[in-house]
Each structure stands twice: as C-alpha cells, then as structure tokens.
Amino acid sequence: MVGRSWLSAVTLALLLLVAGCAAPYASDTATESPDTETTDPSQRTSTETAHDATSSDPSDEKAGSEPGIDSPNGTGTAVGQSERVVVKNGSLSVNATEVYQRVERLMGVDADTPTVQIRQLGAVDFSRGRVSPRYRALGYQSDPGNESQCGSFAPAYAASDEVIISPDNLTETGAKLVLAHEYVHIIQRNVEGYDNLSTVGSHGLRHAVTEGTAVYVADAYAREYDKSWHDTTPLGIRECLYRSVGDTGRELSGRYYFGGRYFDQRLNSSTDISSVYRSPPNTTEQLVHGLAPSAEPPVDLSVTFEGTESWQANRPERMGELGVRTWLHTELPQDRVDAAATGWGNDTLASFGEENRTSVTWVTRWDTSSDADEFADAVDDIGGELETADVATLRHVRVSERTVVVFAGNESFVDGAEATGNGGNVTVIAPRGPSDEISSARRGPPVVS
C-alpha cells in the first residue's frame, strides 16, 4: 500500500498536436481568466505570462546576457547549437533561439529547429468546460473555480514543427517559460524511448507523461536561469491550478501537475528523461505517488454490468486514482482527498442510460479495509453535500471489506440498482421495471488509467 505522505488512432506526434499544449503561467498585470484546457488548438493555454514582442533575431540580444549560455551562434558542443529559430507574423521580446538551445541542453538532445508563429488566440477561460452526462451524474458542476489567484494566462501550443504563441501581456520571463514548455514538445520525440509511450494504456496517462515532461523541463529551466513568477516556478503554477480550478478543469490540470511532479520525483536531472520513457508509469496511482512502473500494480477486479431495456450499460473504463481524486475534490478539502484516495487498488466505472438520464455505477477496490472505510466515509460526506444542494443523488454499498460500489445519478436508478459479489468479483444489476429483463452483460478489462 502506498504511504500516506503525499509524494508528484493516433500517433504520438498527433497526440502532441491535439493534446498538448496548454502551459499556463501568469502575467503581473493581465486580468484575463484562464480557459478550460481543451483539445481545440485555438483555445489551448500556455506557460508563463509577461511583456510583448520585439526582435526575433538572436543578434539583437546580447549573447550570454543570462548565466550558463553560450553564444547562440557559437562553436560549443553539438547539443544546444541548433540553427536560428525564425519567428513569423510578429516578434517576441526574447531571444527565441537562445531559449531553444537552452532547452536542448537541459534535455541533452538535439532536434530540428522549429519556427515560432505569433497568433492572437483569444482570452483564456477555464470556466467554459462542458460537464459530460457521466460527470453530471457524479455531481460535477460548471464552477469557474478560483484560478485567478494563480495568475492570468496566455495561450500557446506546439505542432509537429512549430510553436504557436499569443504573446499579449507576457512578461519577458513569462515568454521564455512559455517557449521552454512548448519547445519540449518539439524535442521530446527525439528522446530515447519516446516510442514506448504509444504502449501506455490510456490517453489520459500518455497525456500526463508528455505534458509532465514539458512542465518538468520548464521548471528546470526556471531554476537553472533563475526565472520565477511571484516566487514560484512552472510546477508551482501547475499545483496552484490543480487546487484552484473548477470541476471541469481539474482532471486535465491534474495531468500536468502530477505528470510534472512524477518526473521531479523520479529523476535527478532533466537529461535523464529517457529513463521514464523507456519504462513509463502504468497507472495514475504510480503517477500521483512517484512510483516505479513495477510498484503497486492494480489489484484483481472483475466486474459484470447487467443492463436492462430501461438501463443499458455503456462501455466500462478505469478512472484510476487521479479520477478518484478529481471527483472527491468536487466537495472535499485537500486533506480529505489525500486520505480517501490513497490506497486505491483498482476501479471500474460504467454509465447507464442516455444523455438526460445518465446514471453511473463505480466499483472501487482498495488495498486494505481501512482504505475502503476512508473512501466510503468520503462518499457519505459528498452525497450529503450534493443532495442538500439538489445536484445529484448518491448511494454506496459494501460488497466486501475492500470493495465499495457507488451508484450516482437518477434517483430511481440509485435506489434500485444492486451490486453483489465476493472480493474482486462483482456483478452490478441495473433496476428493472415490470416488463424489463436483463438484456446485456458487459465484462472485460478496463483501460489502464
């Protein structure tokens, strides 16, 4: 069991284009609110914030103006001596080439030089996220959160061979950290073991590893070159966002934060990223607690979902410890979330019904009976809060000492659903009306999360 102390079809190239990157940082003066991080490139967020554009020509910035950097056109080692970065459609207040060469050195990897495109991508607004029917059944709400305490945000993202950045209101420090984060996505494909990430079992976990790399290296950049925003660094910004965003943005924010922290916990140097890529984490429990991929494998859990004509079971999936934490965070303080989510062993969630009457059954199995007790107590507290606010209906049953099943959503479903079993073998039966018969049984291994 993990200790109680809190420790951090698509190709992967397409994953970088579609899923990454939103690397928020903040401006000393801007007042825009951050956007829910999204797969729409035109709405993605970026790394730190600061002034606006000027020259993109390396000769316009004095070489060596910050510690630890050779001349951009010098004759140093092969790593970090890439050609000049061309900035299009405008200019930046920082030397884009110098930042790129530094990131190459921090990663110990050479890569083809990207271009940088200046675009006006619009304001960032984390509150715009849509709550899916499944999450609505669990009590998630379109809450704007309190992320403004973390700063204000500017969009940027990385494509296959270019970085797109919206530099309005970026300070010079912010522009450098935004670029550092996005440059990682250009370079990381050249890191040994990168292709192994295609075998990671879920999109969410792959995304956490790819974005976690960028957060970690940008954090290393901030420390190496003494860059900060309000006395924090890229990883600190991500932690603030994870704790402060509303329900719709927390899971995605968690991928960035726990992904970055995973590398920070596992590595001594940003040049060692390949060691994680060669053997990436298999579950978000490992991600959250900085565990080796061989540690804490999921415990045995086999679930059969039996639907009826009224309540058809949809495809089950594993939510993982990050999914549990995200849900608990909707109503509970951080210390309760930590206690109730730690000790996760395995889970399977399936939704029943359609859009306006979706309900959920979430089967969770824990490392010990005490872990299951803490989770069950947390569910009781969440249920009371949600029912008082008339947001959702919850009920849980204990199938065994270590197995807790949560029913959520439509009141008739929650009251009538059943769960039976022994240990890691569980059968969930949807409520039946007078004319209903069991119409399907869905079983099988969930995706890894």
Image (cartoon, grey):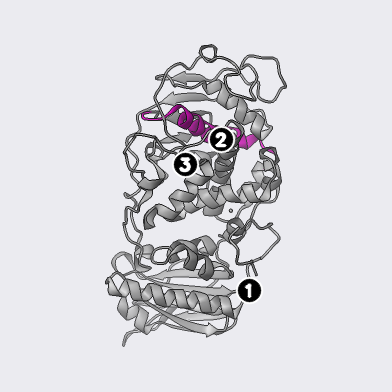
Q: Quadrant of residue 250?
A: bottom left
Q: Is residue 408 visible?
A: no
Mark 2 vs 1: CB contact within 8 A? no
Q: Residue furthest front?
A: 231
User: Which mark sits nearer the N-terminus, 2 or 3?
Assistant: 3
| Magenta highlight on residue 189 | yes
Q: Residue at x 36, y 84 (%)?
A: 416
Residue 307: image x %, image y %? 42, 77
Does residue 82 show up? yes
Report the residue at 33% width, 67% height from top.
Answer: 354
Q: Position of residue 275 (x, y in %)?
A: 71, 45
Disc 2 packing (10 Å; few <14; some 14–19; many ≥20) = many
Image mark for residue 300: 1
Which mark identifies residue 174? none
**Label 3: which secondary element:** helix
Which residue is located at x 47 percent, y 20 percent? Answer: 87
Give the mark count.
3
Assess disc 1: are there few (<14), some (14-19) or many (≥20) residues with their C-alpha within 10 Å of its C-alpha: few
Q: Secondary structure under badge 1? A: loop
| Separation (CA) of disc 2 from disc 1 | 42 Å
Residue occupying image coordinates x 31% and y 80%: 412
Question: What amino acid is at disc 3?
Answer: Val
- Gap in Å between the C-alphas at discs 2 and 3? 26 Å
Camera-side residue: 155 or 71? 71
User: What kind of residue is marked 1?
Assistant: Asp
Sequence-earlier tag: 1 or 3: 3
Q: Is residue 31 above or below residue 278?
A: above
Question: In the rendered image, which residue does mark 2 sit on?
Answer: 222
Magenta: main secondary structure: helix
Q: Residue 62 location in percent, x, y?
A: 55, 14
